[in-house]
Image (cartoon, helix red, strand yellow):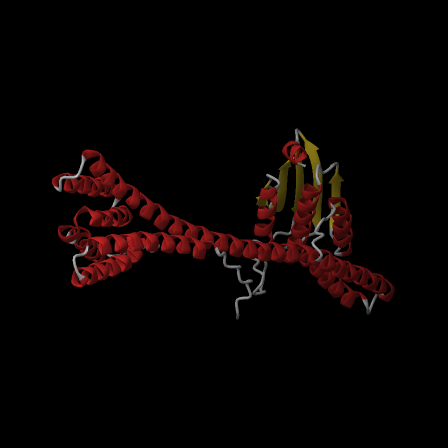
Amino acid sequence: MQDRTPNVHVSPAPRLAKGVLFATLTSFFVIMLLNAVNSASGPVELACAAAALAVSFVLQFRHSEPGACHRPARDRVLTLSAQFILAYTPIALFEVQWGAMAGFLAGSLLLLVPGRYAWPLYGAAGASILVIALLQGRAVTESIYLGQSTLLTGVVVFGLSRLVELVEELNEARGEVARIAVITERLRFSRDLHDLLGYSLSAITLKCELIVRLVPVHPERALDELKDVLVTSRQSLADVRRLSSGLRAMSLAQEVTSAKSLLTAADVRTTVVADFDPPTQDVDTVLAAVLREAVTNLLRHSKVRNCTIEVTEDDGTLRLTVENDGVIPSYRDASRESGNGLGNLTQRLVVVQGRLTAGLAPGGKFRVQAVIPTQSNSSNS
């Protein structure tokens, strides 16, 4: 099956960051080439300098690529060694004017060497140019300037290279967030569809089975039940339309009335105790979904004869309890898609800071209970 997840728009930020890095490195190397032109004594020296700069340019871009620090140690040692040779050997010909190349080496050391070694080596690169300048008879201020320029170049290279990597990581994270949002919305839609239609379809199935039994002996009652099926099917259609339009609100009061009617039609003695006032629409919808799922489950997974639906509010807590007898411990739904309604309801309750418990109660009954703090939900509404 093809993945129909929408393609996430690719941000131009990574391309822009790489462009800034490319432009900066190119500018540095053009300046170095101009220095070589001024210092070269002939075309041979100039050609050697241009070749060395070209190789250094390629090496630096390799070192500045995102994830370069995760390459094999041998690869990093070889490329750093090559850059070291290209940074210091030509100084014999071009003197300290070539020393700016050590700045790129300093930046590469920060990018490729583990942190506790990187910064001392970075500092050593700047100090080396300072020492070389002094040995060549440069003034102290000029020597300090050249050493600081080397360190500044290294920081610029390191900062821009890390910026490219961080922008790419951020762009990938943005795409992942978008994909997760799509998946989450799909799960929400699936959960809502299950909650809305699972109950209605179970009710239709139950009533149709009842109609089949009633037709030969009580055709009038069968006709009444058939009318109820028609009402339920129309309600299901309205639920689907409401779901597709994003209007997913449900009413607990309506669900209590509907559940009592359905259970009565299934010859289940139903006791309803309802004293509640949901603080928000979200709480009302969640509790209505819990009741739907509980009634659906008790009709599918038990031979229920008595059921109690109780909704109470006390001590800042709204509590919905559905308890039934006729539990069949060994029962397993034969359907391949037996549902994951209780799991869906647990996720729903988390949103309103509630909790769900489901399991056997004293007396061999099965109890589903949802508890929601009303005070916190009132303050969030």
Q: Is residue 340 visible?
A: no
Residue at 25% from the left image edge and 52% from the top image edge: 35
Comparing 180 with 255, the one in front is 180
| Figure label count | 0
Q: Quadrant of residue 370?
A: top right
Residue 1 location, x and y as percent? 52, 71
Q: Please state if 184 lies on the left or on the right of 193 as rendered.
A: left
Q: Residue at x 18, y 54 (%)?
A: 81
Position of residue 143 in the picture relative to residue 214 (left or right): left
Q: Position of residue 108 (x, y in %)?
A: 26, 50
Q: Residue at x 71, y 42 (%)?
A: 281
**Image quarter in which the C terminus is found:** top right
Residue 162 placement (x, y as % from top left) = 36, 48
Q: Does the rendering let one see residue 188? A: yes
Relative image position of residue 287 (x, y in whole percent): 68, 44
User: Relative to residue 307, is residue 141 depicted above or below?
Assistant: above
The single residue placed furthest to the top in the displayed view is: 315
> Is residue 126 or residue 64 the one in the foreground?
126
Q: Nearer the viewer, residue 202 or 109?
A: 109
